[in-house]
Amino acid sequence: IAGILQCSFNTVRRVIQLFEETHDVLEREGRGRHRLVTGSVRRHFRQIMSQHPSDTSASIANRLEQRSGVRVSDRTIREARRNENYHPVHARVHWHINEQQAARRLQYCNLHQSDNWRQVMFTDEKKFQVDESGIVYWIPIGAPRPRAFVGQVKYTVTVFGAVWFNSRSRLVFIQGSSNTITYLQHVQLAIGNHVRNLRGYSLIHDRTTWSHTHLVHDWLTANRITCMDDYPSVSPELNAIESVWGWMNRYVQSRHPRSQEHLENLVSEAWRRIPTTVVQGYIRRISAIVQQIITAQGWDIDA
C-alpha cells in the first residue's frame, strides 16, 4: 500500500490504526507535509535537472537555493526526482553520420530491403571492458540516454563471433591486434565447424581493411558463402550481432567483474546463455530497421 500511494510505511500503519479505533478516516486540509518543489521552484528544478543531469541530490539542492532562494533537503530533491518521473541511467557511446555515409546507408537499405535475413550471418569483433567512470545521469522516463565516451579502463577482453537465425559460432578470444591473416584465422575458428550448414548464406562483417581482402574472400567463396561488401560504415543497428553484444554486456556488467579472469569467464558465460529466441528476435527486427533508415533517408534512427 505504501508503495502504491508513495508514502511511508508508518503513515499507512497510522491510518489503519486510526480506522480501527474510530471506524472512519477523514482527509483534513492541512494534514501532511507541504510540498516545497512547486510553481516557480519546480520550473527552476527541472531546468537544473536538464542542465546538470549527473549532479548529486546535494548539488541540485544547492543550485536550487541559489536560483530560487528556497532551501530544501537532499531527501526532498530525491522525492522531487521521483515525482517528476526521472530515473537513473548510464551514458552510452554513440556514432555520428555524415552526408556521404547517410547516402551509402540509404543505398544499401534500398538494395537489400527484400532480403531474407534468416539466410545472413552477422559477424563482428567486440571489446568488453570494465571502466571506472560509473557516472549516473537522471533523466525523464522515455528520454534518450546521454552520450559519452568510456572512462578509465580496468579490465578488457576482445572477442570475435557470429550469429545467424538458427545458431551461433564459437566465440573466439583475440590476443593483440588484428590483420588480414589473423582475421581469417578468427573467421575459420568461429565458423569452421558450421560451414557445411552455412553454404548459400551471406555474411556481414565490419568495414575494417583486412576483412575485405582476397585472402578472406577466397576462403568464404570456397565455402559458398557470399560477402556483403556493400555493408555501410557507422551502421551497427543493421548488424544483429551488435544487439547480441549489448545483451551480453548487460549480463556481464550486472555481475560486476572483479578481475581480468572473471571478466573473461563472464563473457564466455553470456555467449552460452543468451537464448536463441532473443537472437532470433534481433534478426527479425532488421527488416523493420531497414525500412526506418529508408524513411530517414539514411540518417540516424537512434535504434
Image (tube, helix red, strand yellow):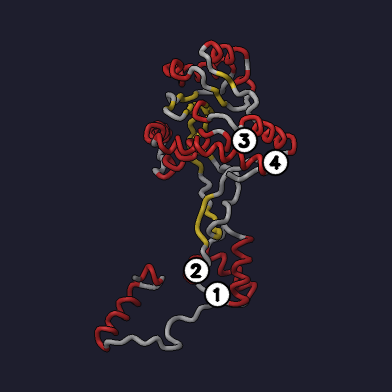
Q: Earlier in the sequence, mark 2 or mark 3?
A: 2
Q: Secondary structure at mark 3?
A: loop
Mark 4 lies on a secondary structure that is: loop
Q: Earlier in the sequence, mark 2 or mark 4?
A: 2
Q: Which residue is mark 2?
A: 83
Instruction: Give the distance between the C-alpha atoms of the residues marked 3 and 1, in whole angstroms.
Output: 43 Å
Which residue is depicted at the point 33% across and 85% down? 25
Which residue is located at x 56 percent, y 13 percent? Answer: 221
Residue 296 versus residue 20: which sits nearer the camera?
Answer: 296
Residue underneath mark 4: 297
Mark 2, secondary structure of its residue: helix
Instruction: Name the amino acid type tagged 2.
Output: Asn
Separation of marks 2 and 3 at Cα, in angstroms? 37 Å
The residue carrying mark 3 is 235
Q: Residues within 10 Å of mark 1 (few under 14, many from 20)?
A: some
Please tell me whether mark 3 or mark 4 is closer to you in this view.
4
120 or 24: nearer the eye? 120
Tell me which amino acid carries mark 3: Ser
The x, y position of residue 142, in whole percent, is 54, 56
In this rendering, is residue 291 above or below 144? above
Numbered disc in front, either 2 or 3:
3
In percent of width and height, residue 141 lies at: 53, 59
Amino acid residing under circle 4: Gln
